[in-house]
Every structure is written in structure tokens, then in C-alpha cells.
């Protein structure tokens, strides 16, 4: 796995022990963005040979807590996980096959949307999900 080596320092810099499961989950997610926990589990099993699903869920939770992993929850789909964190990007989701692509925010700074009334909230993020059909699903429709 090409991204395995750098994860040790990344984990240490964020106050986490660099356990083998943490290293492999982070490395696997770099090459497989928007993966479900189930996909992360099977992908990590291919590399390690054996890991429990609970260990994968624990790694994902630990990494989300220190913002090394971001969870997205498209409506009607299982939660997805990605390593792209800390920037202002959104997602495009195919209603047919569930394919997800990152979409950079054209406005730049967070949050990119401002509500008409903020109800005295200090807003730091706005989620935008674009829905439609990918080219493959359009062709098969």
C-alpha cells in the first residue's frame, strides 16, 4: 500500500498511537475515498489477513475524533468515510449506483452558505450534496 509509511507520523502528530490497524485503515482510505465501513473492513482484511469489524469501527471513530477522517451520510445510503478533511468541499451522489465524487466549493471559505437567519448560531460548516445520475446510469436508463 503506497500510503502506508506516512501514516505513522500523521497518527503521532494527532495524539494517536500508530497501531497497525490504524495505519492500514488510513492508508486504504487514501486510495478508496467515500468507502463504507464494510468496504474499509474488507479492504483492510485483504492487507492484514485478520481484523475485527469492531476494530475497524473503533479506528474510524478515533480518526474522526482527531479529524483525520471525515464521515459523510448521504440520505438513503450507508455512512461513507474519506481522508479529505479540513477543506471546504462538497459531494455529488448518483441516485442510481451511489457513486460519490468530491466537488470543490466555488465560494472558497467556510461556510460557503449563509442562512437567512442564523438563530444566533456561530456557523462553521454547511453541507451541500448534489444529487443526480452518473453517465453510466444515464446510459442504462
Image (cartoon, rainbow, N blue to C red):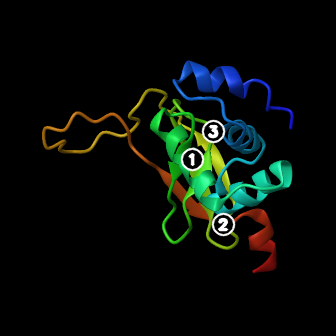
For the N terminus, give its image quadrant: top right
**Residue count near mark 2 (Cα–Cα under 10 Å), binned few <14, some 14–19, many ≥20:** some
Residue 98 badge: 2
**Residue count near mark 1 (Cα–Cα under 10 Å), binned few <14, some 14–19, many ≥20:** many
Secondary structure under the numbered disc 1 in the rendered image: helix
| Picture layout, residue 63 above or below residue 36 | above
Q: Earlier in the sequence, mark 1 or mark 2?
A: 1
Secondary structure under the numbered disc 2 in the rendered image: loop
Q: Earlier in the sequence, mark 2 or mark 3?
A: 3
Q: Earlier in the sequence, mark 3 or mark 1?
A: 1
| Picture layout, residue 22 above or below residue 10 | below
Estimate the spatial distance between the alpha carbons at disc 3 and disc 1, rounded to whole Å: 10 Å
Would residue 21 appear left or right of 106 to someone viewing this image?
Answer: right
| Picture layout, residue 137 above or below residue 8 | below
The residue that label 1 is drawn on is 60
The answer to the question of whether label 2 and label 3 lie on touching residues, with beta carbons closer than 8 A, is no
**Residue count near mark 3 (Cα–Cα under 10 Å), binned few <14, some 14–19, many ≥20:** many
Secondary structure under the numbered disc 3 in the rendered image: loop
Please give the name of the residue rendered at 65% of the width and 52% of the height, measured from the top-left corner.
34
Please give the name of the residue rendered at 56% of the width and 66% of the height, measured from the top-left corner.
78
Please give the name of the residue rendered at 61% of the width and 65% of the height, measured from the top-left corner.
132
Residue 89 picture location, percent across and down: 54, 38
Amino acid at each position: 500500500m503506497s500510503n502506508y509509511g506516512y501514516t505513522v507520523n500523521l497518527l503521532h502528530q494527532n495524539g494517536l498511537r500508530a497501531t497497525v490497524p490504524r495505519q492500514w485503515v488510513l492508508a486504504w482510505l487514501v486510495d478508496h475515498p467515500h468507502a463504507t465501513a464494510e468496504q474499509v473492513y474488507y479492504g483492510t482484511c485483504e492487507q492484514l489477513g485478520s481484523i475485527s469489524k469492531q476494530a475497524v469501527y473503533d479506528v474510524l471513530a478515533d480518526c474522526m475524533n482527531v479529524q483525520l477522517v471525515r464521515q459523510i451520510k448521504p440520505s438513503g445510503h450507508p455512512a461513507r468515510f474519506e481522508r479529505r478533511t479540513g477543506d471546504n468541499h462538497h459531494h455529488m451522489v448518483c441516485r442510481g449506483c451511489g457513486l460519490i465524487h468530491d466537488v470543490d466549493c466555488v465560494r472558497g471559505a467556510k461556510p460557503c452558505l449563509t442562512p437567512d437567519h442564523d438563530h444566533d448560531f456561530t456557523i462553521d460548516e454547511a453541507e451541500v450534496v448534489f444529487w443526480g445520475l452518473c453517465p453510466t446510469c444515464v446510459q442504462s436508463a
